[in-house]
Amino acid sequence: MIAELITKKDNYEIIRDQVAAILATESAHQQVLARKADKDPDDWKLRVFIEKALPFEEWLGSEVAEDTSPIVNVWFDNTNFETRGSNIVERQKATSIFNVDCYGYGASADNPLGGHNPGDTEAAFSVQRALRFCRNILMASEYTYLGLRGLVWQRWPQGITVFQPELNGVYVQRVAGARFAFSVVYNEMAPQYEGCPIEAISIDVLRSETGELLVEADYDYS
């Protein structure tokens, strides 16, 4: 039996939270840099969530959303364990996929130069901007090991897929989505038995055919 209560987090949870923290931190820093460069900091703003089922819920049912900054939702997808590079006692080499889902909002508006800007086009531009920031941040050299060197072996972009968000089988208007599948190779650990010093050993060995006592010995290690 495992003697102690399991209270630790698995490393996939730590990595997921770290990915989200990196994106949120760097988005805030990029806004600071934008102000210094006399640019609109809102163009570098990302709103980051973890494991949200419907992250763009606030955009539903409104003609013009209050905050149209792109939304990023980081969630754990799956893990494969590799025998090679692992050991059977404590450490398992794992490769996990973390989905960085980006959502952009766009409302149709008049163009000061004439005509209008279609909402679907604005949503596509918004989500692509968020996707660009997420990929560049996570693949920057500063985050080769996601700030978790010793735990993370490697991180790599698995793929990018653009999609149209749905709700109850119906496409959501004015919202565009893109998924950045992010692969991380790392160590996953398991609880270990912690022994205690041996004080004494008593041994009885019986001959199986007759039950005659063959050996009886006591060893004191105190």
Image (cartoon, helix red, strand yellow):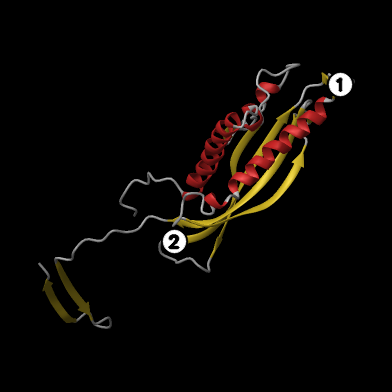
Name the spot of residue 105 as percent of width and height, x first: 73, 27
Residue 98 vertical position relative to residue 217 in the rendered view, above or below: above
Let me know if residue 39 appears in the view: yes
Amino acid type indicated by mark 1: Leu
Q: Quadrant of residue 167?
A: top right
Secondary structure of the residue carrying numbered label 2: strand
Q: Which disc is residue 91 wearing?
A: 2
The quadrant the C terminus occupies is bottom left
Let me know if residue 165 appears in the view: no
Name the spot of residue 1 as percent of width and height, x first: 34, 55
Amino acid type indicated by mark 2: Arg
> In the image, 114: left or right of 122?
right
Q: Quadrant of residue 221?
A: bottom left
The residue located at (59%, 41%) in the rendering is 75
- Taking the view exactly as shown, the residue that stands out farthest to the right is 115
Q: Which disc is residue 113 wearing?
A: 1
The residue located at (81%, 29%) in the rendering is 120
Badge 2 or badge 1: first in the primary sequence: 2
The residue located at (63%, 46%) in the rendering is 136
Nearer to the camera, 217 or 164: 164
Name the spot of residue 59 as percent of width and height, x first: 69, 22
Nearer to the camera, 35 or 136: 35
Q: Are marks 2 and 1 in contact (CB under 8 Å)?
A: no
Residue 145 vertical position relative to residue 170 in the rendered view, above or below: below
Q: Which disc is residue 172 wearing?
A: none
Secondary structure of the residue carrying numbered label 1: loop
Name the spot of residue 118 as percent of width and height, x first: 84, 25
> In the image, 22: left or right of 61?
left
Q: Mark 2 Cα within 10 Å, few/some/many (few <14, many 20+)?
A: some
